[in-house]
Image (tube, helix red, strand yellow):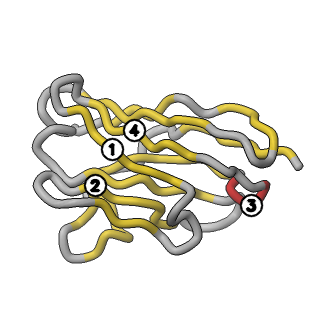
Amino acid sequence: QVQLVESGGGLVQSGGSLTLSCTASGSIVSNNDIAWYRQFPGKQHEFVARIGRYDGANYADSVRKRFTISRDNAKKVVFLQMSRLKPEDTAVYYCNVPLSTNWNRPLNPWGQGTQVTVSS
Protein backbone atom coordinates (compact mmCIF):
# COMPACT_ATOMS: atom_id res chain seq x y z
CA GLN A 1 0.00 0.00 0.00
CA VAL A 2 1.30 3.40 -0.98
CA GLN A 3 2.00 5.64 1.94
CA LEU A 4 3.00 9.26 1.73
CA VAL A 5 4.36 10.99 4.81
CA GLU A 6 3.82 14.64 5.59
CA SER A 7 6.01 16.71 7.91
CA GLY A 8 6.95 20.26 8.75
CA GLY A 9 3.80 21.54 10.36
CA GLY A 10 3.76 23.62 13.51
CA LEU A 11 2.58 26.77 15.18
CA VAL A 12 3.26 30.09 13.49
CA GLN A 13 2.04 33.64 13.88
CA SER A 14 -0.16 35.29 11.32
CA GLY A 15 1.98 36.56 8.45
CA GLY A 16 4.64 33.96 9.06
CA SER A 17 5.93 31.12 6.92
CA LEU A 18 6.24 27.34 7.04
CA THR A 19 7.49 24.74 4.62
CA LEU A 20 5.86 21.32 4.53
CA SER A 21 7.48 18.20 3.09
CA CYS A 22 5.93 15.15 1.47
CA THR A 23 7.96 11.98 1.09
CA ALA A 24 7.26 8.39 0.14
CA SER A 25 9.12 5.18 -0.37
CA GLY A 26 10.24 4.09 -3.80
CA SER A 27 9.49 6.24 -6.81
CA ILE A 28 5.97 7.36 -5.89
CA VAL A 29 6.89 11.01 -5.55
CA SER A 30 9.14 11.24 -8.59
CA ASN A 31 6.83 9.29 -10.92
CA ASN A 32 3.50 10.98 -10.17
CA ASP A 33 1.68 14.23 -9.92
CA ILE A 34 1.56 15.16 -6.25
CA ALA A 35 -1.02 17.35 -4.57
CA TRP A 36 -1.42 18.96 -1.18
CA TYR A 37 -4.77 19.03 0.55
CA ARG A 38 -5.96 20.35 3.87
CA GLN A 39 -8.74 19.48 6.22
CA PHE A 40 -10.47 21.89 8.54
CA PRO A 41 -12.14 20.47 11.66
CA GLY A 42 -15.37 18.79 10.73
CA LYS A 43 -14.87 19.37 7.03
CA GLN A 44 -13.80 17.28 4.08
CA HIS A 45 -10.36 17.53 2.60
CA GLU A 46 -9.91 20.39 0.17
CA PHE A 47 -7.44 20.80 -2.66
CA VAL A 48 -4.57 23.22 -2.02
CA ALA A 49 -1.97 22.76 -4.76
CA ARG A 50 -0.70 20.28 -7.31
CA ILE A 51 2.59 19.81 -9.10
CA GLY A 52 2.72 17.76 -12.25
CA ARG A 53 5.24 15.10 -13.02
CA TYR A 54 5.99 16.85 -16.28
CA ASP A 55 4.05 20.10 -16.25
CA GLY A 56 3.66 22.98 -13.88
CA ALA A 57 1.80 23.80 -10.73
CA ASN A 58 -1.79 24.61 -9.92
CA TYR A 59 -3.24 26.30 -6.86
CA ALA A 60 -6.53 26.84 -5.12
CA ASP A 61 -7.61 30.46 -5.32
CA SER A 62 -7.35 30.80 -1.54
CA VAL A 63 -3.60 30.12 -1.53
CA ARG A 64 -2.43 31.36 -4.90
CA LYS A 65 0.46 33.85 -4.62
CA ARG A 66 1.02 32.83 -0.99
CA PHE A 67 1.89 29.13 -1.32
CA THR A 68 4.44 27.55 -3.65
CA ILE A 69 4.63 23.86 -4.46
CA SER A 70 7.88 22.38 -5.70
CA ARG A 71 9.57 19.02 -6.03
CA ASP A 72 13.02 17.50 -5.73
CA ASN A 73 12.84 14.18 -7.53
CA ALA A 74 16.38 13.24 -6.58
CA LYS A 75 15.45 13.49 -2.91
CA LYS A 76 11.94 12.09 -3.51
CA VAL A 77 10.26 15.02 -1.80
CA VAL A 78 7.58 17.56 -2.63
CA PHE A 79 7.50 20.82 -0.70
CA LEU A 80 4.74 23.26 0.08
CA GLN A 81 6.19 26.64 0.97
CA MET A 82 3.57 28.67 2.77
CA SER A 83 3.99 32.38 3.31
CA ARG A 84 1.81 35.19 4.57
CA LEU A 85 -0.08 32.62 6.58
CA LYS A 86 -3.49 33.50 7.94
CA PRO A 87 -5.45 32.03 10.85
CA GLU A 88 -7.86 30.58 8.29
CA ASP A 89 -5.00 28.45 6.95
CA THR A 90 -5.09 26.49 10.20
CA ALA A 91 -5.76 22.87 9.23
CA VAL A 92 -4.21 19.44 8.92
CA TYR A 93 -2.28 19.26 5.67
CA TYR A 94 -1.95 16.09 3.62
CA CYS A 95 -0.20 15.10 0.42
CA ASN A 96 -1.39 12.47 -2.01
CA VAL A 97 -1.39 11.45 -5.64
CA PRO A 98 -4.38 13.21 -7.22
CA LEU A 99 -6.68 11.54 -9.69
CA SER A 100 -5.79 12.80 -13.15
CA THR A 101 -9.46 13.47 -13.88
CA ASN A 102 -10.25 15.24 -10.63
CA TRP A 103 -7.51 16.76 -8.52
CA ASN A 104 -9.92 17.08 -5.63
CA ARG A 105 -9.87 13.33 -5.23
CA PRO A 106 -6.82 11.38 -4.06
CA LEU A 107 -5.64 8.09 -5.46
CA ASN A 108 -4.49 6.60 -2.15
CA PRO A 109 -5.72 6.44 1.44
CA TRP A 110 -4.88 9.47 3.54
CA GLY A 111 -1.77 9.50 5.69
CA GLN A 112 -1.55 11.11 9.11
CA GLY A 113 -1.05 14.62 7.83
CA THR A 114 0.75 17.46 9.55
CA GLN A 115 -0.96 20.09 11.67
CA VAL A 116 -0.50 23.74 10.78
CA THR A 117 -1.75 26.27 13.31
CA VAL A 118 -1.65 29.98 12.60
CA SER A 119 -2.22 32.26 15.56
CA SER A 120 -3.69 35.71 15.17
Task: Report the amino acid beneath label 4.
Answer: Phe
Residue, disc 3: 88
Mark 2 vs 4, N-terminal side = 2
Please state, as top left, top right, bottom left or bottom right, where the N terminus lies in the image: top left
Residue, disc 2: 51
| Secondary element at tag 4 | strand
Give above or below for 65 relative to 9.
below
Q: How far apart are marks 1 and 2 (CA)?
A: 7 Å
Query: Circle 2: is it few (<14), some (14-19), or many (20+) Cα within 10 Å?
Result: many
Q: For the image shown, how many numbered marks are present on the structure?
A: 4
Give above or below for 78 relative to 93.
above
Residue 36 is situated, as x and y percent measured from the top left of the image, at 42, 53
Asked if the residue at tag 2 contacts the one at tag 1, i.e. Cβ–Cβ closer than 8 Å, the answer is yes
Mark 1 vs 2, N-terminal side = 2
Residue drawn at the location 80% of the way across and 47% of the way down: 14
Residue, disc 4: 79
Residue, disc 1: 70
